[in-house]
Image (tube, grey):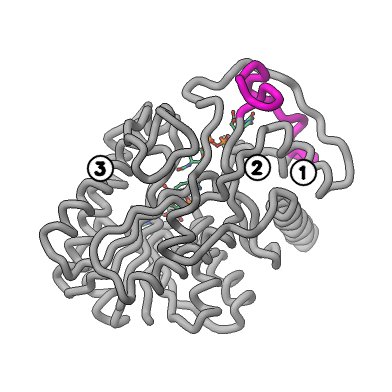
């Protein structure tokens, strides 16, 4: 199949491109490069061993989307394009609603115009908000506690009504937990610009020495060791979950909301320990106050993905940390050699 990956040069989209290409699909990457760089395309071509189509553009440009999807005879769309920084969303909600909600409406209108009705959406566990119970299953109430989560929930509501209006739509709404790690090559991974907000890329920079120490946000939570617990999932498991969803949609119409997580929470200190195991040395940490907006613990009930998609997340926390560390080392050596050659 010809599959359009909006946000395809981003962290999760690029890993999906590898899995799709290796399964024999044609991935067409569409990205405005607001949070990724074009050199991801060349890195992907090194991994998959063949050219990959990349088109620079914004999902809010409906006409361009129609032209691209018509020219490439797109059969299905996986929609990764979106802004995802929680703090930024609270400070600038209009930017997030314009990009994440209007952008998705634009994409769906273009698809409808071309009668393309197979759609996978990158949703987030953030839609659940404060846990009424744990683990979160897909029936858990959805009450986001930030504008970013609101944009994801708004899109889910749009998809629900769209599926009700036209039974030909085949839609998977995948609620990701905490994607981490990198492809085994080390050519692609989570490489945020500036100081990382997320734990794993921050740990990688501490391990490489480019950041001094990790601030552990809170050690008095009611968790195993007092630090926050999350459901970390290897980005390659996540990509394989999208492949499973695509196969499922081939024979199933309607809207299908599914958690993509491991169901096994890990604390900040457990992540530090696993990362130290990957690096082979202790990493400096300092305990700091809780971070505003953080929940103590959340993790997935992952059963529905297994029942519906025949998919489970198989990779361990140690493998997640080892791949993140390998990616950091490859990036550091590449940037070192590029500065030496200039
Ligand atoms: P990312 O920022 O690495 O990738 C998103 C990509 O979309 C970037 O390459 C960016 O340039 C592009 N983009 C953004 N707005 C665009 C627009 N208007 N038009 C075209 N391209 C646009 O983020 P990611 O971690 O790969 O996340 C991918 C998706 O998964 C996002 O929708 C995000 O909300 C969702 N998600 C991410 C996480 C996570 O922790 N990484 C968790 C749950 C859900
Ligand atoms: C994980 C744990 C922190 C950094 C975010 C978004 C969520 C989703 C996934 C998009 C927490 C602790 C972190 C640090 C720390 N993204 N931490 N020191 O906040 O669970 O989820 O990414 O959908 O919407 O909110 O991920 O990696 O920021 O934090 O102690 O320097 O690590 O307190 O317990 P989070 P995170």
| Residue 4 visible to an observer of this rendering | yes
Q: Quadrant of the N terminus?
A: bottom left
**Residue 75, x across and y down, in percent:** 30, 78
C-alpha distance separating marks 2 and 1: 9 Å
Q: Which residue is mark 3?
A: 154
Quarter where residue 326 is shown: bottom right
Q: How would you rate the neighbour count of disc 1 (Cα within 10 Å): few for under 14, some for 14-19, many for 20 or more?
A: many
Q: How would you rate the neighbour count of disc 3 (Cα within 10 Å): few for under 14, some for 14-19, many for 20 or more?
A: some
Residue segment shown in magenta: 206-228
Task: Indicate which disc, 2 or 3, sits on the residue closer to the N terminus.
Answer: 3
C-alpha distance separating marks 2 and 3: 28 Å
SS class, disc 1: helix
SS class, disc 3: helix
Q: Residue at x 41, y 49 (%)?
A: 175
Q: Which residue is mark 1?
A: 275
Task: Determine the main secondary structure of the stretch shown in magenta.
Answer: loop
Residue 211 drawn in magenta: yes
Residue farthest right in this picture: 281
Residue 316 lies, with reference to residue 26, above or below; the image says above
Q: Residue at x 54, y 72 (%)?
A: 19
**Residue 171, x across and y down, in percent:** 29, 62
Disc 2 residue: CB within 8 Å of ligand 2: yes
Q: How would you rate the neighbour count of disc 2 (Cα within 10 Å): few for under 14, some for 14-19, many for 20 or more?
A: many
Q: Residue at x 21, y 57 (%)?
A: 106
Disc 1 residue: CB within 8 Å of ligand 2: no
Residue 200 tag number? 2
Task: Indicate which disc, 3 or 1, sits on the residue closer to the N terminus.
Answer: 3
Q: Are marks 2 and 1 in contact (CB under 8 Å)?
A: yes
**Residue 125, x across and y down, in percent:** 43, 41
Q: Nearer the viewer, residue 50 or 303?
A: 303
């Amino acid at each position: 199949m010809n599959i359009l990956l909006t946000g395809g040069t981003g962290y999760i989209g690029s890993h999906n491109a590898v899995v799709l290409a290796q399964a024999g699909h044609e991935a067409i990457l569409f990205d405005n490069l607001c949070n990724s760089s074009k050199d991801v395309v060349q890195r992907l071509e090194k991994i998959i061993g063949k050219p990959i189509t990349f088109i620079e553009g914004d999902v809010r440009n409906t006409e361009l989307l129609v032209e691209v999807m018509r020219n490439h005879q797109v059969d299905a769309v996986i929609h990764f394009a979106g802004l995802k920084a929680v703090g930024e969303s609270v400070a600038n909600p209009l930017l997030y609603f314009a990009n994440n909600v209007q952008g998705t409406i634009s994409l769906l209108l273009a698809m409808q115009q071309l009668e393309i009705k197979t759609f996978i959406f990158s949703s987030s566990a953030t839609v659940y908000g404060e846990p009424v119970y744990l683990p979160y299953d897909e029936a858990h109430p959805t009450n986001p506690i930030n504008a970013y989560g609101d944009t994801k929930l708004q899109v889910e509501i749009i998809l629900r009504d769209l599926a009700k209006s036209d039974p030909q739509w085949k839609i998977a709404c995948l609620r990701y937990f905490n994607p981490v790690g990198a492809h085994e090559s080390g050519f692609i991974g989570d490489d945020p610009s500036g100081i990382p907000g997320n734990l794993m890329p921050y740990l990688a920079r501490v391990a490489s020495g480019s950041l001094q120490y990790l601030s552990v946000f809170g050690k008095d939570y009611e968790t195993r060791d007092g630090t926050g617990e999350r459901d970390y999932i290897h980005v390659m498991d996540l990509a394989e979950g999208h492949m499973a969803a695509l196969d499922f949609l081939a024979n199933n119409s309607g809207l299908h909301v599914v958690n993509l997580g491991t169901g096994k929470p890990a604390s900040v200190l457990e992540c530090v320990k696993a990362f130290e195991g990957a690096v082979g040395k202790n990493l400096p940490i300092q305990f700091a106050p809780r971070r505003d907006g953080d929940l103590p613990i959340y993790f997935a009930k992952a059963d529905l993905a297994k029942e519906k998609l025949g998919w489970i997340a198989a990779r361990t926390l140690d493998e997640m940390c080892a791949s993140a560390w390998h990616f950091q080392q490859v990036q550091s050596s590449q940037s070192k050699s590029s500065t030496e050659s200039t």
